[in-house]
Amino acid sequence: MKIENLKLKIIFFGGRHTTEILESLSEKFEVLLVISSDQSVVNASINKKIPFAKVLEINEKLINGIKKIKPDIGVVADFGLIIPKKLIDVFPNGILNVHPSLLPKYRGPTPVQTAILNGDMKTGITIIRIDEKVDRGPIIFQEEHFISPSDNSETVYAHLFKRAAKILPDLLPRFMKGLLKSFEQNHKNATYTKSLKKEDGFIAVDKVPAKQKLERMINAYHPWPSVWTRYPLTSQKSQKALIKLHPGGYIHVEGKKAMKYKDFINGYERGEEFLKKLHLI
C-alpha cells in the first residue's frame, strides 16, 4: 500500500483553536468521531457530517463506545482533559498529541500564555505519542516558530495549529509506516504550566506591574482572562467601572465597545488619569 493512499480511521480530540486540524484530517482520512467540549469544534463536526461527542470528562461509557468503532489512531490538540491509559490502550497505534511548545519546555495547559509572559522570542509545535503522564511521551516531530512583539495568545495558538493542520496529513501515514524516528524527552529539563483563573488577570491600580510586564500580561491573557481592574472613571469615586486592557492599544469598559486609548480619554472624565497610572501613556 502506498503511503499517500493509506486510509486511516482516526478519532480526533480537539479544543477551540483546532477546527483547521479537523478539516485537514477529514479531507484525507476517515474521522470516525470527534470528541470535544468546544462548540466551534462541534459545529465543524456537524458541517462535515462527522459524529461527535461533546464531553466534560472521560468516562467508561465513552471508552466503551470508542472500542466498538475500532479506530487506527487518535489525534489530540488543545483538548484540555487528561486521557487515561485505559483509553490510550484502545488505539492499536496510540494517540498523537499536538502540543504548542518546544517540549519538554512548558508542559501542561497554558504553554503559549507562559511563553509570552516570560518574554520568549520563540515557541513551536511538538508532536508526541502520548503516555499516561502529561505531555511526557516520545517526540516524533518538532518545529520552532518565532513570537513577534505584537503577538498575543490568540494569534500564536491560531498560527501553531494552522501549521499543524498542514503537517499532519503527511506525518500520519509516515508514522504508521514506521518511517519517523522518535526520541525521548529530556525529562530533567521539563518545565510546567498552570491553568489560568480569572484572578490571574487582575491588577491593582496602586500596585501596577512594570510597563514591560504589563504589556506581556495584556498579550498573554488575551482573550481570557484579560488584564482587568476596577477604577472610578467619573468624579464619583465610589462608582468603579470594570475595565479590561486588550492588545493593540484597546481598552474595554464594561457595557461598552472596546476603544482606542484616544477615544477612551475623550469619553471619560478620568480616562487620561487612569492610563497614566498604568504607565500606558
Image (spheres, rainbow, N blue to C red):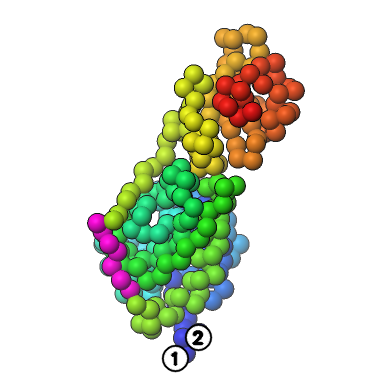
Q: Position of residue 18 (x, y in %)?
A: 52, 58
Q: Is residue 128 above or below residue 207?
A: below
The range drawn in magenta is 182-188
Q: Position of residue 67 (x, y in %)?
A: 33, 68
Tell me the quarter of the image containing the C terminus.
top right
| C-alpha separation, residue under disc 1 versus residue under disc 2 | 7 Å
Front one among 71 and 257: 257
Q: Position of residue 20 (x, y in %)?
A: 56, 62
Residue most extreme to the bottom: 1
Q: Amino acid at mark 1?
A: Met
Q: Amino acid at mark 2?
A: Asn
Is 84 left or right of 116, judged from the image as shown? Answer: left
Q: Which residue is tagged 2? A: 5
Residue 45 appears in view: no
* Within-10-Å neighbours for mark 1: few <14, some 14–19, many 20+: few
* Residue 62 inside the magenta-drawn segment: no
Res 239 → quadrant: top right
Q: Are marks 1 and 2 in contact (CB under 8 Å)?
A: yes
For label 2, the SS is helix
In this rendering, the count of numbered labels is 2
Q: Residue at x 33, y 73 (%)?
A: 182
Res 215 → quadrant: top right
Q: Is residue 225 above or below residue 278?
A: below
Q: Residue at x 70, y 26 (%)?
A: 264
* Within-10-Å neighbours for mark 2: few <14, some 14–19, many 20+: few
Q: Which residue is tagged 1? A: 1
For label 1, the SS is loop
